[in-house]
Amino acid sequence: MSWTNSRNAELKERAAKVIPGGMYGHESTALLPGDFPQFFRRAEGARLWDVDDNEYIDYMCAYGPNLLGYREPQVEAAVAAQAALGDTLTGPSEVMVTLAETMVSMLSAADWAMFCKNGTDATSMATVIARAHTGKRKILVGKGVYHGAAPWCTPGPAGILSEDRGHIVYYRDQDPQDLADAMKAHAGDIAAVFATPFRHETFRDQSEPDATFAGEARRLCDAEGVVLVLDEVRSAFRLSREGAWAGLGVTPDLTAIGKVIGNGQPISALVGLEHMRKAASSVFVTGSFWFSAVPMAAALATLKIVRDSDYLERLAHTGRLFREGLAAQAADHGFTLRQTGPAQMPQILFEDDPEMRLGYFWTAAAVRRGVYLHPYHNMFINAALTEADVALTLQATDAAFAALKAQDRAHLPLERPAVRDRLERAALLSM
């Protein structure tokens, strides 16, 4: 069946009448090529079908939550079993205690766990607990780093007051000297330093976990009595089974975990070390759905697979196959790709493409050929992706490279005028 987007276009038109902007947040397609699908009907394993029944091998994994494959059978069975008993009740199910025990047993940075719904919940909870623990005000975060959509951290300035960020201080992400300078400038009033396991801003090249930065961040925080918060909302269980910095010998005080632990069910977590327990017990953070049992049952099933299977090794293997195949294809067609970050979370940008015209055309061409890639956000590999899927992917991307090569580069369209503004903003934030 040939690719079409008529149903998707109809839904976008209807949505524009009843939803502000037609869509909002990270699900908005305002910064994507115009014919990217926005509405989807179903998913299975590594595949996704949009409302026009176009089938895609999906490299976004719902922007991260799909770790094991859509509708993974063991997780789905746990969901169904718990749903038959109850989900959102007057109080939590015993599964909450079992889940906390499981996370504490698996994660080197966890002596306790608290559960919420999304990454913003977890990172915002970390700021409150850090301030309760230290009695200080300042929160240091990397410039341009995404920690969620609350007023203190959202990348969108509309509706945000200067007072909302009055005690947020920015340092250059993954730069130990810049972090040291920022801490010196605000010594005596710093509650927390937020860090990500590696650099993964949108529109930018990614990095790998850096032992030098991680170790220096830990040393600086210890010297000043500051809480070190590791934001693993995007990376948890994709780089390591026990924490992205565990292999570097660095243990954060608090770790925000999201997206993957329920394999698509709405649940996230904040875990912490023993000395943070009293502060965590003192704050008031809650939500009616934070205690829902079905997502917790899904998380237990997911973590069992994380603990007992070779899912992580498979993620790395297929990620490397994907990366190596793309590099060879790009060279064959006369292009140079910048593939950065861990293979399980690939970022793919074109060299000599400052306005991302090449990347936008190529990803749109791949989408029309059944492979969902993203032009500026890091992507994700899930454990259901097979070598055969990668081979089919590379057939589509090779054709997309050929289509790009046939174009006059000087006349490739800038798909979205807003892209230029975002690129300029990203450059400013990284300075």
Image: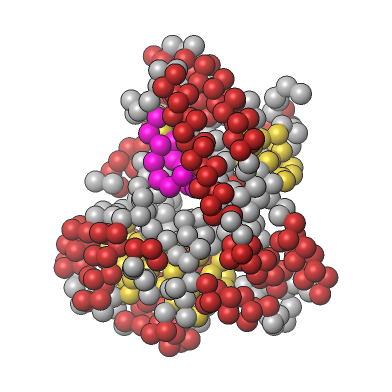
| Left-right relation of 318 to 49 | left
Quadrant where the N terminus is found in the figure = top right
Q: Quadrant of residue 244?
A: bottom left
Q: Position of residue 247 (x, y in %)?
A: 38, 63
Whether residue 299 is visible, yes or no, is no
- From which residue to which does the magenta span run? 337-348
User: Which residue is drawn at the image coordinates 63% and 36% (left, top)?
Assistant: 389
From the viewer's side, name the closer residue of 407 and 242. 242
Q: Is residue 99 magenta?
A: no
Q: Position of residue 248 (x, y in %)?
A: 34, 63
Q: Position of residue 53 (x, y in %)?
A: 75, 33
Q: Position of residue 256 (x, y in %)?
A: 47, 67
Whether residue 424 is visible, yes or no, is yes
From the viewer's side, name the closer residue of 71 and 148. 71
**In the depicted structure, whether residue 301 falls above or below residue 46:** below
User: Which residue is drawn at the image coordinates 30% and 41% (left, top)?
Assistant: 427
The residue positioned farthest toward the right in the image shown: 84
**In the depicted structure, whether residue 11 falls above or below residue 272:** above
**In the depicted structure, whether residue 14 falls above or below residue 281:** above
| Left-right relation of 65 to 125 | right
From the viewer's side, name the closer residue of 150 and 262. 262
Q: Quadrant of residue 305?
A: bottom right
